[in-house]
Structure formats: structure tokens, C-alpha cells
Amino acid sequence: MAVDLLLGLQWGDEGKGKIVDVLTSKYDIIARFQGGPNAGHTLEFDGQKHVLHTIPSGIFHDETINLVGNGVVIDPVIFKKELDNLSKNNVDYKSKLLISRKAHLILPTHRLLDAASEASKGKAKIGSTLKGIGPTYMDKTGRNGIRVGDLELENWKEKYRTLADKHEKMIKFYDVDIQYDLAELEKEFFNAVKTLKSLTFIDSEAYLHEAQKEGKTILAEGAQGSLLDIDFGTYPFVTSSTTTAAGACTGLGVAPNKIGEAYGIFKAYTTRVGSGPFPTELFDEDGETMGRVGNEFGATTGRARRCGWLDLVALKYAVQVNGITQLIMMKGDVLSGFKTLKVCTAYNYKGKEIQHLPYNIEAENVTPVYTEIKGWAADLTGMTKVDELPKEFNDYVEFLEKELEIPIKVVSVGPDRTQTIQR
Ligand code: GDP
Ligand code: IMO
Ligand code: MG
């Protein structure tokens, strides 16, 4: 069986957690392929909200295996907190959570290095979640990292010490004021490693190959979004992994010719958290309304998300880079009450109108060109069928489908599992 992908097409927080949870009943295995605890994936059902950071969003279903792939970076401390939360909710995770031996570990000193790097950048800081993501992927590509499989070796603590000592020297090099008590952080870390070691570590690429041969259905769950991709995102204001479709190949060992559906998920507007260019960002009452109604606060850091109109130039780019086969539109309910909606269909770039995403999208280089569309007043959150949706909402969706040349097969009208409409 081919492996399906679910990918965020904007700057993250599109609603991946909710949709993976909704789709899970169709799959035998849900597999995360990149990122780490910088992600915050929210699920809501039975009146309860759950936020996952590293654990795949299929974990609340009894029959599904959840795999943390080789491309993911794991902070044992945060992972343990996630497991504790699952236990509190009576989720028996032990039998259905698998971890790739090739996944890299985030050490306490990776987090400190992240903080030191950001502090040294001053105003130019990336706005990182400070979870140690950048430094951990640097050690991975620099061939210095410690992997989950190392925890099964006798000498792993020596490897740990060598790397942590080197990190301490690097922290000093940044020459910024970072206060920390490493002994305390290490106590917490080694305790969490014990918990991690009680889980099942596997050679995940072999496991997935076998599962594919047996005809098992597999969904690869992305974290972040295409515009935060290390290559195709708004560099340097990006994360340190491949968030686009190719990341599922390297982050799970899935061959490119074994990819099936590529679900692309986007919000009916745009948000971004952290620094970096955002051409359609709003600084007025409309942006404020989106943030308030959409409850746009980061699921990992609690920071307010910046809001703006939908950017089709950027969305088309993401569709192309990922080979998206069907689209899922989230948070349409948040736009209820806007008399007129705007959609960016081109950029004014250095005096010329262009339709593609150029190298520089900072405000001084790019001005969005908008198409205006009539809004709708009705509250969508209680609607469950396509024929209940207002005409103007359908017009909005059809306009986007025509522009993107891909069907929008699902629209989400609220955070709960049940507030999901198939088209
Ligand atoms: P993820 O990182 O892509 O999983 O998304 P987040 O969980 O960070 O952010 C999405 C937020 O929007 C969460 O608070 C969800 O509960 C919420 N959400 C998801 N879909 C909808 C929707 O259709 N309407 C509304 N109003 N909220 C939604
Ligand atoms: P999910 O999976 C939104 C952003 C950070 C920062 C930049 C780099 O929930 O969609 P990092 O911690 O990776 O060094 O931060 O990327 N960022 C996210 N923004 N959603 C996320 O994940 C994000 N993960 C990282 O805000 O701008
Ligand atoms: Mg999120």
C-alpha cells in the first residue's frame, strides 16, 4: 500500500492534529516524520482538548499504531510529560507507540544553545520555540548527535558527557547571559530517559516496509508547514527540518514512488507565529478579529499568532512543492461576519505584478494584490452537511479550488472532531 501524507501548507498551526485524529480511523499506522516538540497539535473531542507535541495524533484511537519516525527529534523531558498526560486520560499508549532507533535526542544543552543563539541575534532573532530544534538538527547533520538507539548501548552516557561538555563551551562562546543549573536539568533528563527506555524502540524503516507489504494503511503526519521548510520556507525564519513531502521520504524511509494521497491542509486565512516576512499580515481590526475569534495563540508557547488574509501565491507554491492531491480547509467558521473577504492572488514585486513566490517577500519588496469576495454572516459551527453551508461560503471555496486547481474535499467549521464536513 502507498503511504499517504498530511502536510501543513502555511506557517504551521493549520489544524493538522485535528484532521489526523479525524482521519485515523481509516489508517493502521500514523507516523510522524520530522520536527519535534516545537510542534503543538490540538485535538478536541468529548468536550476535552488535548495538545500533542511529539506523539502522533492517532494516539487516542485504540486500534492504531503510532510511530515516531527517524526524522523526528525527541526531548525525553517533554515526551515524558506527554506520556503522563496520556496516562491521566487513561490512554494505554505502551501497546501502540513505537519509536525509531534513528530518531535524534534533544539534550538539555541543545535547549540552552537555542536560547543562547536567539539571545545573540537580538532583533534578528528567529522567534524559535526554544525547544532545542535547531541545535539538535545541527548535531545530526554535523554527525555528532545522540540517537534513541544509542540508549541501548552501554557507553551512551560517555557520548552524552562529551557532547554536553562541548555544548557548554559553545554556550560560553555566544557570550550572552544565560542562567542555568545543568545538574538540575540533567537530573530531569536522565529520569525522563528511563521512561523513554520503557517504550518499544524499533528499526522503523524495516517495520514500515513490512507493513506496506502486508497492505497496512499508513498516514504520515507532518509538523510545521511548507513555509517553515528549511529549503523552501522563508529562510532564515524557518525551522530546521524538511516540512514538505520529501521530508516523509527521509524521515520515515518511504520511497518517493510509494507515496499515495498528499493531503494539504490550510486555514481559510493565514497565521504565523515568530519572526519573518508575512505579506498579507493585518495590523488592523480585521486581523485582531481573526486572532480573537480564531483563538490564535500558540499551542506550544502561548504566543499570539500574527493574522492576515489568505495568500494564494504562497499556497500555490506549497501545493506545487508537495504535489498535493486534495485540500482540506480549516477554520472557515472564523471568517463568519466579515462583509468582504480578501484573497491575495498576486504580488506587486519591484513594480511588476507576479504570480509566483519570489526570493524576497519582505514588505519592502512585495505588496499583495487582492481579489475581494463577498463574506457570509451565518455561524457555521453547528453545521454538519454541505447543503447547510451558506452560498457565499461555497463561492469562497469554489474560488479557491479554481485558483489552486485541486479539490477541497473537507472543510472544518470548529475545533471539535465532529465539526468536519466532507464535500
Ligand atoms: P496544528 O499545529 O496544525 O495541529 O494546529 P494547532 O493545534 O496548533 O492550531 C489549530 C487551532 O485551531 C487549535 O486550537 C484547534 O483546536 C483549532 N481548530 C482546528 N480546526 C478548527 C476549525 O475549523 N475552527 C476553529 N474555530 N478552530 C479550529
Ligand atoms: P505545528 O506543528 C507554528 C516556528 C517558530 C519560529 C520558527 C522556528 O504546531 O504547526 P523552532 O522552534 O523550530 O526553532 O522555530 O518556526 N514554528 C512553528 N510555528 N507551528 C509550528 O508547529 C511551529 N514549529 C516551529 O515559531 O518562528
Ligand atoms: Mg500547532
Image: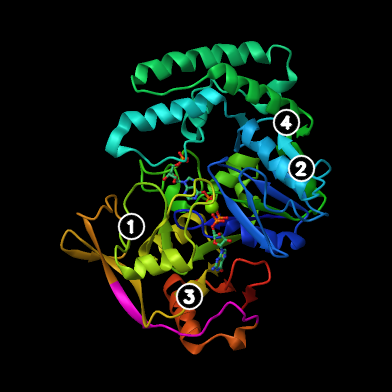
Q: Is mark 2 within 8 Å of ligand 1?
A: no
Point out the frontmost of discs 4 and 2: 4
Point out the frontmost of discs 4 and 1: 4
Q: Quadrant of the N terminus?
A: bottom right
- Residue 19, percent from left and from top: 63, 62
Callout 4 secondary element? helix
Q: Which mark is residue 357?
A: 1
Q: Quadrant of residue 115?
A: top left
Question: Vertically, is 418 above or below 363?
Answer: below
Q: Which mark is residue 401?
A: 3
Point out the frontmost of discs 3 and 2: 2
Question: Vertically, is 278 above or below 418?
Answer: above
Q: Are marks 4 and 1 in contact (CB under 8 Å)?
A: no
Binning the other alpha carbons within 10 Å of mark 4 as few (below 14), some (14 to 19) or many (20 upward) gives: many
Q: Nearer the viewer, residue 423 or 183?
A: 183
Label 4 to label 1, Cα distance in Å?
42 Å
Residue type of the residue flagged with mark 2 = Leu
- Residue 35, percent from left and from top: 55, 41
Q: Nearer the viewer, residue 46 or 133?
A: 46
Q: Which mark is residue 376?
A: none
Question: Vertically, is 235 above or below 316?
Answer: above
Tell which circle, 4 or 3, labels the residue nearer the N-terminal end.
4
Residue at 74% across, 25% down: 194
Label 1 to label 3, Cα distance in Å?
19 Å
Q: Which residue is mark 4?
A: 196
Q: Which residues are magenta?
A: 370-384
Callout 1 secondary element? loop
Tell which circle, 1 or 3, labels the residue nearer the N-terminal end.
1
Q: Which mark is residue 97?
A: 2
Binning the other alpha carbons within 10 Å of mark 3 as few (below 14), some (14 to 19) or many (20 upward) gives: some
Binning the other alpha carbons within 10 Å of mark 2 as few (below 14), some (14 to 19) or many (20 upward) gives: many
Tell which circle, 3 or 2, labels the residue nearer the N-terminal end.
2
